[in-house]
Image (cartoon, rainbow, N blue to C red):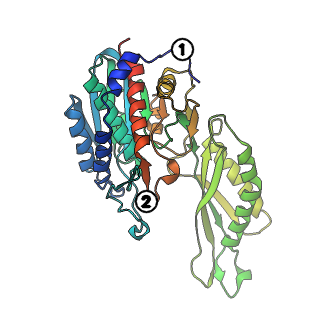
Amino acid sequence: MTNGSHQINKEAADKVLAQINEEEVVEFLRGLVRIPTVNPPGDVRDAISYCADALAAEGYEIELLTAEEEKPNLVASLSGDEGPTLLFNAHVDVVPTGDENNWTHPPFGAELVDGRVYGRGAGDDKASVTAQVMAGIALARAGVPIKGKLIVNEVADEEVGGALGAGLVAQNEKIKPDYVIVGEQTLNRVCLGEKGAAGTTVTVYGRAAHGALPWEGVNAIEGMGKVIVALQQELWPKLAERTHPLFKPSSATISLIDGGVKANVVPDKCSIYVDRRIIPGEDPENVRDEIHEIAERAIADVVGLRVESQLGQHGGRQAHFIEASEPLAQAMLKANEFLGYNTEPTGFSMGTDGKHFVAEGYPAIVYGPGDPALAHQPDEWVGVDEVLEATRAYALAAVSLLASK
């Protein structure tokens, strides 16, 4: 799904691709994985320095944006003549390893086995960081004249929401990118946007009583049981039918439950968290209302029960996407086409730092190496071939958008 505009200059493309060295890419990734950046606590100073040093050595201007000392964000710029700004964004923080006895490869060993690099963050998201840094280096080394600016922006804080990472960058008045490519695990497919989220807490209230005298109380946990069954029977089937050409269907899952006071007390309160992922056209407030109405009906026949429903602390966010015909989408699709990769656009199911840039009015897509199903698991890995493919694709997207014609 590409059109005739934004054709890639083959001479410039060949020059840039010639500067991508497989061994250098793999060793950079392994070195990055060996730097623990677990969030929490989220200290990424060594990883950001590692990336900054590599880019500075190739002529990038280095700036750090920092709200907390342990969470610096790299803004590395390569500037040419007047023109647009393309920003590569990915995150260096990673989730905790969990029980390391469940790993067969050391979480920070970055072992290379059968073409795979293993380790926490190997895929999420240090593969994308590596590919972006190496693509930026290839562009600089090739000496291809550019119109505009490439910013390689590797950030902290994504795994806990990103306010101190991409959020800080997106709100910086001096950056203002025209195009944003967010690196996440998309199997090197072009994701034109991401699903929204409208996580909702549902709380059923009853009346406490002694466990030996249950008729004196109103059991909130039993009331919540009715709510859960109603959601499964009434809402889940509806969500499966709500679709969009780019995205998997709208979805919900109950991911948390909390209730009860003591083993011998009738519980007067029970809460669940409904993790709602929404597609374009769904609104977070309407999502909350829909859940609440089903919950109210479910307990309506039980005297003494009431229910409250509340969106999460951030209030939810809508899905976002750009059209395949837009210049940013075409640049990435043309890069994949040039390299013989998948050119069918799709959407990303998880949340990314793209939301911060979109909130400020900057168009963003999601693209990167690795399988999202492997993220956050023991023995997380990424294929070396995938990282090299992404490096080439990022580099060609930059050529498409920035190289002088």
In the shown orientation, is residue 352 left or right of residue 20? right
Q: Position of residue 335 (x, y in %)?
A: 46, 26
**Vertical relation: 353 (above or below) 160:** above
- Report the residue marked by disc 2: 379
Residue drawn at 74 percent across, 65 percent down: 226
Q: CA distance from mark 1 to mark 2?
A: 42 Å
Q: Position of residue 259 (x, y in %)?
A: 59, 71
Q: Looking at the image, can residue 67 be seen?
A: no
Q: Which mark is residue 4?
A: 1
Mark 2 residue crowding within 10 angstroms, few (<14) / some (14–19) / many (20+):
many
Task: Tell me whether the residue at label 1 lies in contact with that at label 2, contact meaning CB atoms closer than 8 angstroms.
Answer: no
In the shown orientation, is residue 357 left or right of residue 31? right
Q: Looking at the image, can residue 347 be seen?
A: yes
Q: Which mark is residue 221?
A: none
What type is the residue that disc 2 sits on? Answer: Asp
In the shown orientation, is residue 215 left or right of residue 133? right
Q: Residue furthest top?
A: 405
Query: For the residue labelled by badge 1, is the local secondary structure a helix, a strand or a loop?
Result: loop
Nearest the camera: 109 or 250?
Answer: 109
Residue drawn at 41 percent across, 52 percent down: 114
**Vertical relation: 41 (above or below) 125:** below
Residue drawn at 66 percent across, 34 percent down: 245
**Vertical relation: 404 (above or below) 169:** above
Nearest the camera: 163 or 118?
Answer: 118
Q: Quarter holding the C terminus?
A: top left
Nearest the camera: 144 or 293?
Answer: 144
Q: Position of residue 276 (x, y in %)?
A: 61, 50
Q: Residue furthest bottom?
A: 212
Nearest the camera: 264 or 404?
Answer: 404
Mark 1 residue crowding within 10 angstroms, few (<14) / some (14–19) / many (20+):
few
Q: Residue furthest right?
A: 301
What type is the residue that disc 1 sits on? Answer: Gly
